[in-house]
Amino acid sequence: MHLTKGETFNLAYDLGGDDFVRMIVEKTHTCYEGTHNKLHEWGYGCGKCPSCILRKRGYEDYLKIRGKL
């Protein structure tokens, strides 16, 4: 609750590495539109709703935290 999306992705990495982050990206869904036919680097979604934008920014922040961006 007190973590940003980037920090949450980073925590997932700390708990289970790249495989755990990939599992979260591929198996969880937060899109308000319910779009589940397009897999982005940050997960499934329409890419335009507030939830997708937040998740994309969080994933980009995570990549910066890990030095991957």
Image (cartoon, helix red, strand yellow):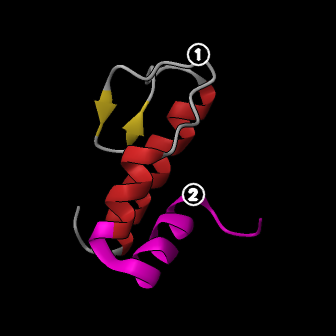
Q: Which amino acid does label 2 sit on?
A: Lys
Determine if the magenta segment contains residue 17. yes
Q: Where is residue 6 in the image (x, y as percent from the top left)?
A: 50, 62
- Quarter containing the C terminus: bottom left
Judged by its main secondary structure, the magenta piece is: helix
Q: Where is residue 17 in the image (x, y as percent from the top left)?
A: 33, 77
> In the displayed structure, would residue 2 be above or below residue 40?
below
Is tag 2's residue or tag 1's residue first in the polypeptide sequence?
2
Quarter of the rendering containing residue 56: top left
Quarter of the rendering containing residue 67: bottom left
> In the displayed structure, would residue 61 be above or below residue 65?
above
> Which residue is at a point 48% across and 18% down the rendered structure image?
35
Residue range (magenta): 1-19
Contact check, label 2 and label 1, Cβ < 8 Å? no
> Which residue is at a point 49% across and 53% down the rendered structure image?
58
Determine if the magenta segment contains residue 64. no
* Element carrying mark 2: helix
- Given this view, does label 2 or label 1 mark the residue nearer the observer? 1
Left or right? Give the position of 54 relative to 41: right
Residue placed most toward the observer, 69 or 21: 21
Quarter of the rendering containing residue 54: top right
Question: Which numbered dot is residue 33?
Answer: 1
Q: Count residues near mark 1 (Cα–Cα under 10 Å), then give few for <14, some for 14-19, many for 20+.
A: some
Q: Which amino acid does label 1 sit on?
A: Glu
> Which residue is at a point 77% across and 65% down the rendered structure image?
1
Residue at which label 2 appears:
5
Q: Count residues near mark 2 (Cα–Cα under 10 Å), then give few for <14, some for 14-19, many for 20+.
A: some
**Label 2 vs label 1: CA separation?**
19 Å
Residue placed most toward the observer, 41 or 35: 35
> Which residue is at a point 32% across and 58% down the rendered structure image?
22
